[in-house]
Image (spheres, helix red, strand yellow):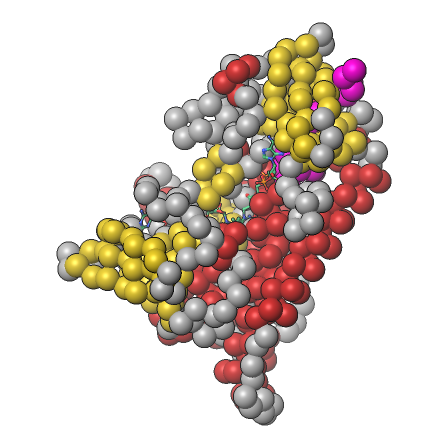
Amino acid sequence: MSKQFDVVVIGGGPGGYIAAIRAAQLGMNVACIDEWKNAKGGPAPGGTCTNVGCIPSKALLQSSEHFDHANHHFADHGISAKDVTIDIAKMLGRKDAVVKQNNDGILYLLKKNKVSFFHGRGSFVKAAEGGHEIKVAGAAEETLVGKQVIVATGSNARALAGVPFDEKNVLSNDGALRIEVVPKKLVLIGSGVIGLEMGSVWRRLGAEVTILEGLPTFLGAVDEQIAKEAKKAFDKQGLKIELGVKVGEIKNSAKGVSVAFTNAKGEAQAIEADKLIVSIGRVPNTIGLNAEGVGLQLDERGAIVVDADCRTNLPGVWAVGDVVRGPMLAHKAEEEGVAVAERIAGQHGHVNFNTIPWVIYTSPEIAWVGRTEQQLKADGVKYKAGTFPFLANGRARALGDTTGMVKFLADAASDEILGVHIVGPMASELIAEAVVAMEFRASSEDIARICHAHPSLSEATKEAALAVEKRTLNF
Ligand code: FAD
Ligand code: NAI
């Protein structure tokens, strides 16, 4: 006997569980299916983000930053901390506890919102009377029928051809978050977001880290001036980043991993490392969904094809998050999930792709929203730029962290803010003001005229806005 629902959500990551909650808030009878298992085999909703992504990586970034501060920065404050050690098992245990708090929190939220949760793999069976039949295979075998179905099955780490992840020596993001002994030598392939965040964690804990990047430019999607400033800081920290390399043979043995590559000068090189993290992007996940069986259209990358409103080619079937086009970010997945639930309810759900912020949680943090200077040039837009360094910000000096700057890009004629780019302390928090401003189509003058608390890092944002008209007050 099948169970009937207004909405069946397949996948309980940030795209799926948020869609389920929003649909339930709007009065619908909702099921959410997720297959992720915790160490005991029980449900662990939250997807990549909660289990092996955003949350555990930030927990390790925090622990390793404390360690780094104790070793290198406490002395500046007159605090002596000799022979500082770190218990990696305890650090990993804390990270796991943070993950569990989030898993439990999501289960609680689903229950609170009366979403029926099914632990197992969901797959399409066939179109059914008034909807779609979905099979759940897992702890319980169930057949559900959803009038509407939202697919939010996420993504998986991309492996290098011929080099499978064994999660012992050759690690994806999953293994990278579970290394039990600090490697002496760690190689990462790909200096994107994961490469920089995970490379930072293990460097701070004592590993000699080399990141091999295929492209000749560092962080090509980031504003060039900001990327350059960040690179300078990473170089100073000893994070070795080799750009323009071509990775060759990789040998994985009991002793470790040897990575052969050709550097930017065309010289053949090799590194013997204890561990290799491959962070070369992620692939949309539709494994076990029976997409082909029901004719759900995928593109050449394996992503589910959707229109601007997240509708797939099958009537009543929607898809959101990493499994569809667009940036692979938790908050983008959430926004799409909310918008789809609202569209199903007959409302006008909306996601503004121009104001999705990006954050890289390194030290310094890198955050941005809107277009970069190189994009504006390519688009032929006339713009004005204003920057303000944290070096001239009182709060940054008091914190002892004056690396970086805030940069504003505004339309030359209308002064509308077109992009805000930050490298420096708490960039992840500061960027929110820029997102709000851009969402309300503010001008740089609007920000320049707003009273910002003193002393605060946010004053650097105001000053960068003032810099657009060359009228900074503190620089
Ligand atoms: P996912 O989170 O991948 O969730 C999909 C869920 O669906 C999973 O639980 C999976 O088990 C389940 N599932 C799949 N198929 C089925 C099926 N057939 N039946 C049942 N269940 C199924 N983004 C940020 O915005 N900020 C960050 O700081 C950040 N840090 C990251 C750090 C790392 C190391 C990684 C790898 C990613 C990070 N991301 C970050 C990206 C973020 O994790 C993803 O963008 C986000 O998780 C996508 O959400 P989703 O709901 O689309 O998919
Ligand atoms: P990425 O796309 O950020 O970076 C991959 C890098 O690998 C690129 O610089 C690319 O040029 C390089 N590369 C690709 N193939 C290569 C090869 N064969 N040899 C050498 N270099 C190669 O992907 P990453 O870091 O794996 O992260 C995946 C996604 O997860 C991110 O794009 C992001 O969407 C999400 N994420 C978000 C975070 C955040 O918001 N703070 C943190 C971590 C991940």
Q: Nearer the viewer, residue 132 or 54?
A: 132
Relative to 379, is 70 on the left or the right? right
The quadrant where ligand 1 appears is top right
Residue 191 % position (x, y): 38, 55
Relative to 10, is 355 on the left or the right? left
Where 189 sits versus 126, above or below? below
Whether residue 264 can be seen here: no
Residue 409 % position (x, y): 45, 51
Where 409 sits versus 313, above or below? below
Number of labelled discs?
0
Residue 403, magenta (yes or no): no
Whether residue 40 can be seen here: yes
Relative to 251, is 67 on the left or the right? right
Residue at x 80% of width, y 25% of height: 29
Residue 394 % position (x, y): 57, 77
* Magenta span: 1-19
